[in-house]
Image: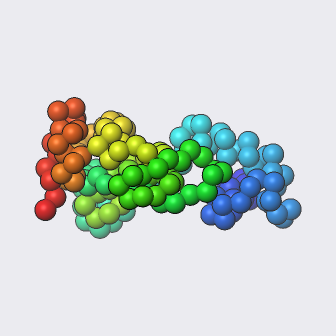
């Protein structure tokens, strides 16, 4: 099982295709089947959530955050590898990642989508996705545009960061 997990990490870290998996690892069909099982059962998210809680406790903080920051980042991408769009504000064709992070910068909810989605429209799904795993978040710091557009629908209070 350890070799299967190592093979999954090898593919993910290197960004290579499953067919390029070296022969020292188990057969690629076996590794891919386990990867799909882990992905479909949200095992990666559960492990990330547990590690995040343990790291917060190690730093002397409460396990579950009560405040967070939401922002987005746009990156250029090639045509292959998933959906992409055009961010007119930054003049970039690629993908955008909205991220909800705790006040120390740990990623709570990363949410990738095409760059053509506006910041104010992409923030809502991120906030909704954060409610179940992080129910104690009461304050989210956001840019002015996100705060003004998402405020009426937001499950938490959105003050601006200064």
Residue 73, image x, y percentages: 39, 58
Question: Residue 53, located in which quarter of the rendered image?
Answer: bottom left
Q: Is residue 127 depicted above or below 159 in this figure?
A: above
The structure residue drawn at horizontal position 23% and vertical position 38%, both measured from the top left corner, is 150
The structure residue drawn at horizontal position 59% and vertical position 42%, both measured from the top left corner, is 39
Residue furthest top in the image: 153
Residue 134 visible from this viewpoint: no
* Image coloring type: rainbow
Residue 36 visible from this viewpoint: yes
The structure residue drawn at horizontal position 22% and vertical position 52%, both measured from the top left corner, is 142
Residue furthest bottom in the image: 59
Residue 44, image x, y percentages: 54, 48
Q: How many marks?
A: 0
In the picture provided, is 24 more to the left or to the right than 154? right
Residue 130, image x, y percentages: 33, 41
44, 95: nearer the viewer: 95
Residue furthest right in the image: 23
Question: Residue 103, located in which quarter of the rendered image?
Answer: bottom left
* Image quarter in which the C terminus is found: bottom left
Question: Residue 41, located in which quarter of the rendered image?
Answer: top right
The structure residue drawn at horizontal position 76% and vertical position 53%, both measured from the top left corner, is 18
Residue 127, image x, y percentages: 30, 40
Q: Is residue 1 depicted above or below 133 in this figure?
A: below
67, 110: nearer the viewer: 110
């Amino acid at each position: 099982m350890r070799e299967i997990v190592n093979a999954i990490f090898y593919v993910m870290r290197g960004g290579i295709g499953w067919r390029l998996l070296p022969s020292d690892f188990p057969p690629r069909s076996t590794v891919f089947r386990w990867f799909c099982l882990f992905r479909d059962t949200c095992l990666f998210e559960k492990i990330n959530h547990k590690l995040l809680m343990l790291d917060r406790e190690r730093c002397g903080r409460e396990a579950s955050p009560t405040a967070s920051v939401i922002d987005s980042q746009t990156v250029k991408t090639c045509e292959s590898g998933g959906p992409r769009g055009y961010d007119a504000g930054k003049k970039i064709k690629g993908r955008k990642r909205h991220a909800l992070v705790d006040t120390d910068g740990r990623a709570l909810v990363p949410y990738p989508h095409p760059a053509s989605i506006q910041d104010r429209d992409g923030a809502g799904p991120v906030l909704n996705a954060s409610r179940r795993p992080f129910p104690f978040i009461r304050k989210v710091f956001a840019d002015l545009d996100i705060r003004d557009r998402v405020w009426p629908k937001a499950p938490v209070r959105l003050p601006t960061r200064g």
